Amino acid sequence: MIRPALALAVLCIVSGGSSKPTERKTRVQEDPPLSQLQHDDDTNFEYDHEAFLGQDDAKAFEQLAPEESKRRLSIIVDKMDGDGDGWVSEAEITAWIRRAQKKHVSDSVERQWADFDLDQDGRVTWAEYRNVTYGSYLDDPADSEYNYTQMMTRDERRFRAADADRDLIADKQEFAAFLHPEDHEHMRDIVVQETMEDIDKNGDGFIDLQEYIGDMFQPEDGEEEPEWVATERQQFAEFRDKNGDGKMDKEETLDWILPSDYDHAEAESKHLLFESDTDKDGKLSKQEILDKYDLFVGSQVTDFGEALLRHDEF
């Protein structure tokens, strides 16, 4: 069975005003920084739930009745209040969200580590990864409906970039860089290269406006262009194409997908504080958070898994 675990996610776009770049989620990996979901509080708070709780725990909270959600949220508030002063600051919310981010990445690495460390020697070789991911294709390429050679070549290139000592054997830290390159400074070049390969359809080494929009929106027959596309055209001209030559080079692409001046956790904590701070004192009481429990954790019964029914924590 082919397991293309590293297929890039489609860029999720959130429309915004023309005064600043549109908030967006990284194209890198299937696991974006906070959530793959669109951040649109007018529709639902699902993005906020995943940002605040982490993706697995957010799904579990969706099963809970409102009173149980509030009870568990109350426990979380006590944990967030790091200095024990009875208030939750923006910095404490940010720290909590970063904790959820790190836990999601760590859990992802642990799950996949068990799949790929076939001989259980505490290392994952390129051969192990290749055989697990592309085993059936390697056994009989002629029997496959798709030629996975290019994907395998890309994976090997990323594996080599993550492999600090160049021995084609990954320890857990190197494997984490391979799976989540957006979190590692030394992987930025490979992130940009993969992104440009995906979007640069004419192969000129740049991303022009047509390619930029085409990566996000490809209309069906007769489909009208949504309003956010026009916003993105403006974003491209005002913020993406910094030198005004009508296309994005590698540096401009890096600034787009991994901006150094934008922190997802800080932005989300500011949003949660703004929406919940009813007395506008710049900090949140437990009651203010519980009053907005639907924003922080929600409660909509679904058929998702039972990931968070962990009574040792709650």
Image (tube, rainbow, N blue to C red):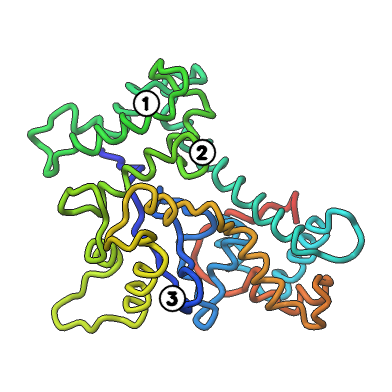
Q: Which residue is mark 3?
A: 15
- The one nearer the camera, 52 or 308, is 52
Q: Residue at x 81, y 64 (%)?
A: 88
- Classify 10 Å Cα crowding around label 1: few (below 14), some (14-19), many (20 and above): some
Query: What amino acid type should be assigned to the residue bearing mark 2?
Result: His
Label 3 vs label 2: CA separation?
28 Å
Could you say which disc has been placed on residue 160 in the image? Answer: 1
Secondary element under disc 2, as helix, strand or loop, is: loop
Label 3 vs label 1: CA separation?
37 Å
- The one nearer the camera, 8 or 215, is 215
- Classify 10 Å Cα crowding around label 2: few (below 14), some (14-19), many (20 and above): some
Query: What amino acid type should be assigned to the residue bearing mark 3?
Result: Ser
Pointers 2 and 1 in contact (CB under 8 A)? Answer: no
Asked where in the image residue 1 lies, by quadrant, the reply is top left
Q: Is residue 111 above or below residue 217?
A: above
Q: Which residue is mark 2?
A: 184
Q: Is 259 displayed left or right of 87 in the figure? A: left
- The one nearer the camera, 270 or 73, is 270
Label 2 vs label 1: CA separation?
14 Å
**Residue 2 in the image, given as x and y percentages of width and height:** 26, 39
Quadrant in the picture for the C terminus: bottom right
Q: Is residue 306 visible?
A: no
